[in-house]
Image (tube, rainbow, N blue to C red):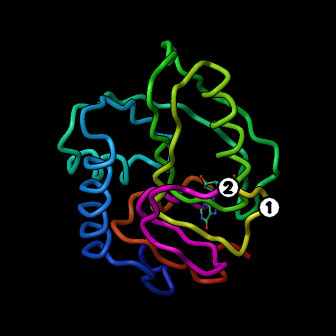
Amino acid sequence: MFIDDVERVLISEEEIDKRCKEIGAQISKDYSGKTPVVLGLLKGSIPFMAELIKHLSIDCEIEFMAVSSYSGTESNGDVKIVKDLDRSIIGEDVIIVEDIVDTGKTLEKVKELLYSKGANSVTVASLLDKPDRRIIDIEAEYVGFVIPNEFVVGFGLDFNQKYRNLPFVGVLKEECYK
Ligand code: IMP
């Protein structure tokens, strides 16, 4: 069973639930009186996005974009927009929802694109942050958990498209990706 590939749980389902509530409350406060466009980056943001928007007590719209750069456990650094927005975001306040900020290349590219399309403001909510791997000087405004430099899966994060459906964030056994 795929669950047997997990060496250990890094962040439990309960911890994620609790943190999503806290971030949802903070965003609701910060965006009070506004209607932000909450923009999930497919596919890794899906579980976090679903959990987070339940805790927004303000009006919001949701959209998705797909961006790719990873193969296996390594980013090839070449960020491609696989599915672009199909609506105008001129003058909108956008909150990008991401699974993890790693090198920062994805966010740099997406933020640049959104501003070039006329967004009024762009902030980032990321479930995880791996600061040790950062190449681009970029930070998410809302971070669920800061993690060490380890390859993690679950709650949206994949290894070769698998393990996204784990309800927690965990570390894989080395033999599964080596
Ligand atoms: P960045 O552009 O290097 O910041 O990478 C962002 C993307 O890399 C994320 O959206 C993930 O899809 C992927 N990624 C980075 N670290 C991990 C990891 O530990 N597990 C799974 N995917 C990861």
- Residue at the spot x=31%, y=68% of the render? 19
Q: Is residue 124 magenta?
A: no
Q: Where is residue 101 in the image (x, y as percent from the top left)?
A: 61, 59
In the image, which residues are magenta?
Answer: 138-159
How dense is the environment of label 2, judged by Cα within 10 Å: few (below 14), some, or many (20 and up)?
some
Q: Is mark 2 on a helix, strand or loop?
A: loop
The answer to whether residue 17 is left or right of residue 81 is left
Q: Specify the amino acid type for callout 1.
A: Ile
Q: Is residue 153 magenta?
A: yes
- Asked if the residue under mark 2 is in contact with the one under mark 1, i.e. CB atoms within 8 Å, the reply is no
96 or 169: nearer the viewer: 96
Please name whichever residue, 174 or 112, is drawn nearer the observer in this view of the structure: 112
Mark seen at residue 138: 2
Which residue appears at 51% of the width and 59% of the height?
A: 157
For ligand 1, the image quadrant comes to bottom right
Determine whether the beta carbon of the residue marked 1 sits less than 8 angstroms from the nearest atom of ligand 1. Answer: yes
Which residue is label 1 attached to? 135
**Residue in the image at 48% along x and 13% along y:** 87
Task: Determine whether 13 is above or below 25 in the image.
Answer: below
> Label 2 amino acid?
Ile
